[in-house]
Amino acid sequence: EIVLTQSPATLSLSPGERATLSCRASQSVSNYLAWYQQKPGQAPRLLIYDASNRATGIPARFSGSGSGTDFTLTISSLEPEDFAVYYCQQRTNWWTFGQGTKVEIK
Amino acid sequence: VQLVESGGGLVQPGGSLRLSCAASGLTFSDYAMNWVRQAPGKGLEWVSTIGSGGGTFYADSVKGRFTISRDKSKNTVNLHMNSLRAEDTAVYYCASFPNGEHYFDNWGQGTVVTVSS
């Protein structure tokens, strides 16, 4: 099983600041990695797929990068609606998710 | 696209439950259908997948206890859950991905399963 480790567990930032979230895989997943956003009481929403491609309707302030075992989700300037939990997910070997990073208001 | 789950509830340990997911707004035969769960206060866990051709896949934690199926005539996917345990308590989400894509691009609102005596 491929284990995805996300860091940090919690990120405390203010609106307008830049957020950088990390996801590390226990073995190479090539570029087969996605990012999701989940708000309280809601289902997850696909943000990024294949490491760097934005899903339909996702604002340009969200960007993804990386390949192999190290990946990053960047939110260039946090909007109030971006405070949420973010998960990474790999599709190379079955489907597994990271444990999540909570982006909270500082 | 709309995915609507039903069938959740309270069940005793060792009991059974069937979850259903009705899909609309998509060409059902072009999508694999999945169940992903989230235990209270925890992260996301993939549970099961059924491909458009009927191939099935299960997480080790549910293999032998859960069965996924799809009904092409009704655009629905079901999850039959047997021998339920306390650790199966979670919100169960139905999710889809297009054939060959393997990223969950559509999600239902979830249905709550509670296993408790």
Image (cartoon, helix red, strand yellow):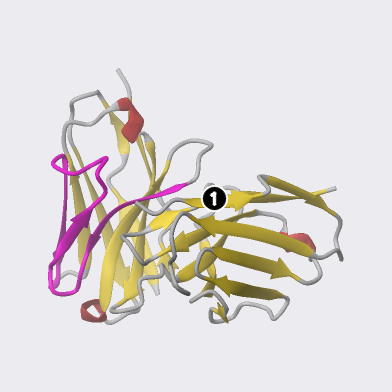
Residue furthest to the top: B117
Q: Secondary structure at mark 1?
A: strand
Chain letter belonging to callout 1: A
> Is B69 covered by the magenta stretch?
yes
- Answer with left or right where residue A45 lies relative to residue A2: right
The range drawn in magenta is: B44-73
- Of residues A73 and B115, the one drawn nearer to the viewer in this rendering: A73
Q: Amino acid at mark 1?
A: Thr
Q: Residue at x 62, y 74 (%)?
A: A65
The answer to which quarter of the image holds residue B112 is top left
Q: Is residue A32 above or below residue B48?
A: below
| Label 1 crowd bin: few (<14), some (14–19), many (20+), radius 10 Å | many
| Coordinates of residue B14 in the picture (x, y in percent) | 18, 25
Q: Residue at x 48, y 74 (%)?
A: A31
| Coordinates of residue A78 in the picture (x, y in percent) | 79, 65
| Coordinates of residue B74 in the picture (x, y in percent) | 17, 69
- Answer with left or right where residue A3 lies relative to residue A10: left
Q: Residue at x 72, y 56 (%)?
A: A83
- Of residues B27 and A85, the one drawn nearer to the viewer in this rendering: A85
Q: Is residue B14 above or below residue B34?
A: above
Q: Residue at x 19, y 74 (%)?
A: B52
Q: Is residue A54 above or below residue B34?
A: below
- Answer with left or right where residue A4 lies relative to residue A1: right
Q: Which residue is mark 1?
A: A5
How many numbered dots are placed on residues in this image? 1
| Coordinates of residue B102 in the picture (x, y in percent) | 35, 71
- Of residues A47 and A51, the one drawn nearer to the viewer in this rendering: A51
> Is A90 covered by the magenta stretch?
no
